[in-house]
Image: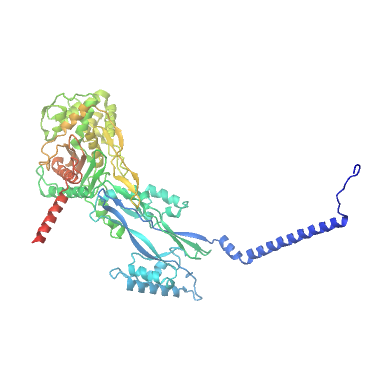
Amino acid sequence: MKGFKIYKDVPDETEMKRRYNGRINIFFFSAFLIFCVIIVRMAILQFVEGPELASQETGGEQKHFPLQPIRGSIIDASGTKLAYSTASNSLYITLMKDYSKKTDKGKANRPEAEKMAKQIVQAFNKYGDPKAEPITVKKVIEDLDLEYNKQHGYEPRRIKTDLTKEEIAYFMENRAKFPGVQIVEENVRHYDPDTVAVQTIGYLRKFGGSKSVKDYEVIDQSNKDQENPGLIYTEEESVGYDGLERMYQEELRGKSGYLSIPINPQNMVDGVPTMVAPEKGLNIHTTIHKDIQLATEQAIMDRLQYLHTHPVSGKLHKDAVTGYAVAMEIDTGHVVAMASMPDYDPNVWGSGGKITQDVVDSSGNGTITIYGSGRSGHGFESMIFLGSVIKPLTVLIGLNEGLFGPNDTYNDQGYASIGREGSETKIRNSSGHRIGPIKPQQAIQQSSNAFMIDWVGKKLVSKYGGEKGVTVWDEYMEQFGLGVVTGSGLPKEHKGLKNYTDTKAAGSNLAALAYASFGQQGKYTPLQLAQYTVMLANEGKRIKPQLVSKITDQNGKVLKEFGREVLNEVDFPKQYWQTIKQGMNTQGIAGFEDFKYDFARKTGTSEQSYKGVNLDNGVFIAFAPRDNPKLAVAVVVPEGGFGSQSAAPIARKIFDAYDEVYGLDGTPHPKKAEEQTEDNSEDETEDNR
């Protein structure tokens, strides 16, 4: 209807009051419930969870007890394991009670522990190896360390290693009888009993006694901050101390296992420990070939014995008691043999055997260091003057510097003179022989000291001046790997001694270069000599000596491969290389009379004075075949006399061994396989009879 408004119903005052009171009641009831929950929770915290939380606040936590990592293997080029680890099960006991508390009379309260020790010994006597040294109850009590003198209360105690299967079965079946018992798989390191390249492979020592090694000192310092239990090194852990064992320590080691142990504020076990197993390390595949290596080692020892019993150059060489050899592939840089003789059995380091002085003396790798294995009677170092094996490089320097040409002729009178006029010093050829007119390649072949002095040493001084001439010589030496490390990566590798830089001791810059030109002013390692020889063979590429071909995991998966690596290169005219290769043709080489390959070689005989007596050292380098070279060999025999008689026969045996395995012409010549076939045929004939 027009003119009227319609209004909604409005609650009266009583209704509004009723609704308000209802809301107030709900609020107070909710608040009451919340306070009840809070009070109940506080009671639980105080009376139920309180002791546990207090324990955690005052020190309750998880402790990690490390278990030894299982080291990977070092495998030779034929697949033979040269270093490997085998499983060894050990018995550990974790103290589940605190036995350090005293009785009222002040005596140790440990009858339960003594009873358990007796039962353990009884089990050892019944199920253990009868040939093993018996373990006494007293020894078990000492190992349990009930007073915590050596270990924390929560740490497991190692009671016995190398458990038999019967011992393992017994303790596993009787866990309830021996609270806290654990059988833990550890490992023992073994090395090939044929002692294959032992100085190159290296050996292990306890981490606690290896911290003089810089790498391990750093690890020791970082141990306390290491969060990953598997990477923490323990004092008793075995680590690589030399050779490939040390060079590839990180890869070989793997990761430690550990027992995760809940402990209470008293540092005692407070729960059941859980175990995380160790991770086995990776496998290192070395380029060393066992057959070639053993042939090299035997060749050295046989030749040393020959020098002791057969006059060479008119006399016996009984002081020749060491020998060193390296064989390196020219295409790949693979080192197939690296021998430092005499050697030793590296198993003695980990067996608990006696480390004699002979073992210590023989542990040095004479192919890379100044102090080699079994140092000779006169105390000679393993690095010696090169002698005439430097002459191919000396001629290369002369050619490249334009000091003479490939077809120039020098008149060798048997000596060269240095020094001021009227007080000259005559430096003669070996045996003082006069050669007459010779070209550069003939100077190498006939080993003319006079040529090297007059046409290289003197002419470098004339061209550059004395001081600069020495610098130029040094630059060439380093380009050819002499006076710098080879890049092999082996620990303790020496870069050689540059005696020619001590011009004051030499008398003058000219004198230093004169003597350096024919190999009497620089001392280098056999590995450097091998690398130098490879560079002569491949005409200017310095190749890294490769000791490892690949790294694999325990399933055989290749994780990393190592290929040919050129460290530096020199660019000389082809004719210069041909000249020196023609010169590397020394005649009358012992042991090579029936060698079927044409090969390039250079002998060396360096002189060193010891207590007023001049002693001759034998040196020999060679590569074969000459025109398509596959293998380079360097051999050094301190105090062995002429290199052609002492070192060369060793090189021949190395070439033969390589030829059998790989083939110098690219085709292996496995005599052993042929011999095996013949033996099998004989066996079949015998059976048919």
Residue 645, above or below 569: below
On screen, residue 552 above or below 416: below
Identify the residue shown where x is 15% and y is 42%.
648
- 43 vs 521, left or right, is right
Residue 375 in view, yes or no: no
Residue 140 image position (x, y, % from top left): 38, 69
Comparing 654 with 102, the one in front is: 654
Pick out the residue farthest to the right. 3
Quarter assignment of residue 655: top left
Direction from residue 3 to residue 343 in the image, left or right: left
The percent coordinates of residue 647 (x first, y second) are 16, 43
Splitting the image into 4 quarters, where does residue 353 fall?
A: bottom left
| Whole-percent x, y for residue 660 in the image | 17, 46
Question: Which sits in the foreground, 139 or 684?
Answer: 684
Residue 683 higher or lower than 337, as above or below: below
Residue placed furthest toward the left:
689
State left or right for residue 206 relative to residue 432.
right
Quadrant into which the C terminus falls: bottom left
Most foreground residue, 689 or 105: 689
Color theme of the render: rainbow
Which quadrant of the rendered structure holds the N terminus? top right
Residue 661 horizontal/vertical position (percent):
20, 46
